[in-house]
Image (spheres, rainbow, N blue to C red):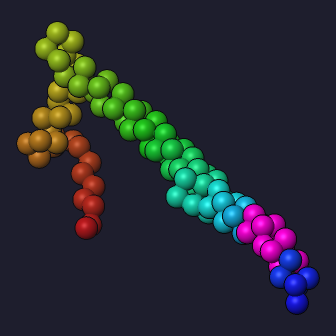
Amino acid sequence: MLEIKLRARQAMFPIFGALVVGYLGYHMVQGQYGVMAYLQMQAKVARAETIEAQLRDEREVLEARVTLLRPDSLDRDMLEERARVMLNYARPDDLVILEGR
């Protein structure tokens, strides 16, 4: 009986150590700040950078169009196009295609 208690006491520390290592290892991979969370965050960052690039391109296109409407560099074709769209006008020789919604 004494030998069983002695062996149990000797086995308790390695078992406890293995449990602590297992606990820490699990949380290192699956925890809030673990490897899986890091990979998910990297994927979110990549998606956000893609969206940012798309928005940057869209902004550049809009800025170019706005530049054409500025008084110092007014483009008559752009002005006519915007006026027709805003006022809902068409010339008699224009072909108008109505979109069904």
* Magenta-drawn stretch, dominant element (helix, strand or loop): helix
Locate the N terminus and report the quarter of the image it occupies.
bottom right
Pick the front one: 75 or 42: 42
Pick the front one: 36 or 92: 36
In the image, is 34 to the left or to the right of 16?
left
Question: Residue 17 in magenta?
Answer: yes
Q: Residue at x 62, y 61 (%)?
A: 27
**Residue with the most extreme top position:** 72
Q: Please, is residue 54 above or below residue 34 in the view? A: above
Q: Position of residue 49 (x, y in %)?
A: 49, 39
Magenta segment boundaries in residue numbering: 7-18
**Residue with the most extreme bottom position:** 1
Q: Position of residue 45 (x, y in %)?
A: 51, 44
Q: Residue at x 46, y 36 (%)?
A: 53
Question: Residue 82 in magenta?
Answer: no
Locate the C terminus and report the quarter of the image it occupies.
bottom left
Q: Please, is residue 76 above or below residue 62 in the view? A: above
Q: Position of residue 62 (x, y in %)?
A: 30, 31
**Residue with the most extreme right position:** 3
Q: Position of residue 65 (x, y in %)?
A: 28, 27
Residue 7 falls in which quadrant of the image? bottom right
Residue 5 falls in which quadrant of the image? bottom right
Pick the front one: 31 or 17: 17
Q: Residue at x 66, y 60 (%)?
A: 24
